[in-house]
Image: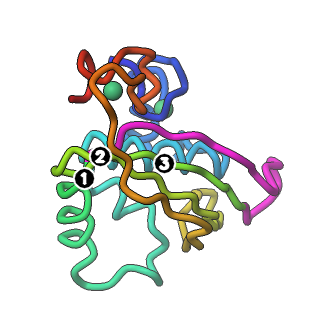
Amino acid sequence: MYCPCNSQLPFSQCCELAHLNHAHVHLPSELMRSRFSAYAVKNYSFIHDTLIESKRNKNELSEIKSFADSVKFIALTIIDTHNEQKNDDKGYVTFQAWYQTPDNTFHWIKEKSEFVKQASLWYYVTGEVETNSMPIKLNRNDLCLCQSGKKYKKCCL
Ligand SMILES: [Zn+2]
Ligand SMILES: [Zn+2]
């Protein structure tokens, strides 16, 4: 299986490494990708554990679960990164993420996320939504929005 983060690498050589060991994340953009992939494969505990502790509320895990279960995350594009130096302890990643809802419409969200490093591990702090799409309806012969290169009818329909 290819990694859900659209790196074109196998999952086992990409975000799964981070899912198995948080210390495998060396850059904010890697945490961004691996958190997106965690939503896609429904690894709720990774999403929970990589959120900075001060931002977790007591129902965090069940809220993550109900959100991740209500949509299907299909594609990610990293648009911009800031402070991606080895010695930085704070960084920003702007990304666009595509998802599909049960009514079979597609949506995207563009967000700037903030990350901090604590005790040599990277954590997600917060995100600022820049833009949100309207629901997108695809025709059967349209190219699928998951970046597979296939027609919608042979892909995510
Ligand atoms: Zn990945
Ligand atoms: Zn697709």
Q: How many marks?
A: 3
Q: Is residue 80 above or below residue 15?
A: below
Q: Residue at x 46, y 39 (%)?
A: 18
**In 3D space, how far apart are the residues under numbered discs 3 and 1 (Cα atoms)?**
12 Å
Which region is colored magenta?
72-91
Q: Nearer the viewer, residue 127 or 28?
A: 127
Q: Closer to the camera: disc 3 or disc 2?
A: 2
Q: Is residue 5 above or below residue 42?
A: above
Q: Position of residue 129 (x, y in %)?
A: 56, 70
Vertical placement of 78 versus 69: above or below?
Answer: above
> Looking at the rendered structure, which numbered label has been put on residue 100?
2
Corner quadrant of residue 98: top left
Q: Which residue is mark 3?
A: 97
Proximity of marks 2 and 1: CB atoms separated by less than 8 Å: yes
10 Å neighbourhood of mark 1: few (<14), some, or many (≥20)? some
Q: Label 3 to label 2, Cα distance in Å?
A: 10 Å
Q: Give whichever of 9, 152 is nearer the camera.
A: 152
Q: In which quadrant is the N terminus drawn?
A: top left
Q: Residue at x 22, y 80 (%)?
A: 59
| Residue 34 spot, x, y in % from top left | 47, 43
Q: CA distance from mark 2 to mark 1?
A: 6 Å
> Image height check: is 20 above or below 28?
above
**Residue 86 shown in magenta:** yes
Q: N-terminal of the two: label 3 or label 1?
A: 1
Check disc 1 and report the residue beneath it.
71
Q: Tell me the residue at 49%/72% (across/down).
A: 52
Query: Is ligand 2 closer than 8 angstroms to the Cβ of mark 2?
Result: no
Q: Nearer the viewer, mark 2 or mark 1?
A: 2
Indicate the amino acid at tag 2: Gln
